[in-house]
Image (tube, rainbow, N blue to C red):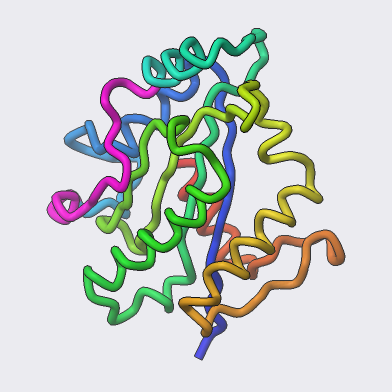
Amino acid sequence: MKAQYAILRFAKYKGPTVSRIEAHNERTKENYASNPDIKTELSKHNFHPVIPDGKYRDISNRIIREAGCRVRKDSVTTVEVLITASPEFFEKKSRKEVKDFFDYAMEFMKSKQREDTYISAVVHVDEKTPHMHLCFVPITSDGRLSAKEIIGNKKRLTQWQDEFWSYMVKKYPDFERGESASLTGRTHIPPRLFKQAARLTRQ
């Protein structure tokens, strides 16, 4: 039996670039020629832990405006979190069990990032491996726009990974802990899973 890992990855977007991910996340197209993994007949089973109330960029701009944040031309205005697990973890899982996994992961994110900064959270079950895209505006607890402070450098990212694993393993004890990137210089997860997560992020 292959080792199973919980996976957490971040991507940053500036200004209008957030619109690029909206069509994929919200399944607004009829066809996805660039992504043959999507089984559109299963898209009806995708679900939203957080339902967007408009276009991603409009929501992001509104949240920033209401928070009174200063925005520079190069400011990161949206962070996307990809949450998933090893494909083996989801084998033979019922829809309820899959939903429970992502509901549990959402509680971790809510403990780390203010819910009023969320743009959307959607779980895709119409691809090979179920995964969640959570988008939020990187506003700090004291009301500043700062992806750097929230996501941070390599050390901070390792802290995110460590805390995520520590949280997830309480409910899912079969998850193995990857080697610390701060010690090895490598990712927490094996190359095949890292490539899978990178592909999902690109999509």
Q: Residue at x 79, y 47 (%)?
A: 154
How many numbered circles does the render carry?
0
Q: Residue at x 56, y 67 (%)?
A: 167
Q: Residue at x 23, y 75 (%)?
A: 94
In the figure, is residue 81 to the left or right of 129?
right
For the C terminus, the image quarter is: top left
Q: Looking at the picture, how far across and down is residue 202, in whole percent?
A: 50, 41
Q: Looking at the picture, how far across and down is residue 15, in whole percent?
A: 53, 15
Asked if 163 appears above or below 4 in the picture, the reply is above
Q: Quadrant of residue 58?
A: top left
Based on the picture, tell me whether residue 98 belongs to the magenta stretch.
no
Q: Looking at the picture, how far across and down is residue 20, in whole percent?
A: 42, 26
Asked if 11 appears above or below 89 in the picture, the reply is above
As drawn, the residue found furthest toward the front would be 142
In the figure, is residue 54 to the left or right of 20?
left
As drawn, the residue found furthest toward the right would be 183
Q: Residue at x 77, y 67 (%)?
A: 180
In the figure, is residue 143 to the left or right of 1?
right
Based on the picture, tell me whether residue 45 belongs to the magenta stretch.
yes
Q: Looking at the picture, how far across and down is residue 191, in whole percent?
A: 64, 66
In the figure, is residue 143 to the left or right of 19?
right
Which residue is at the front of the view, 41 or 36?
A: 41
Give the magenta range. 40-56
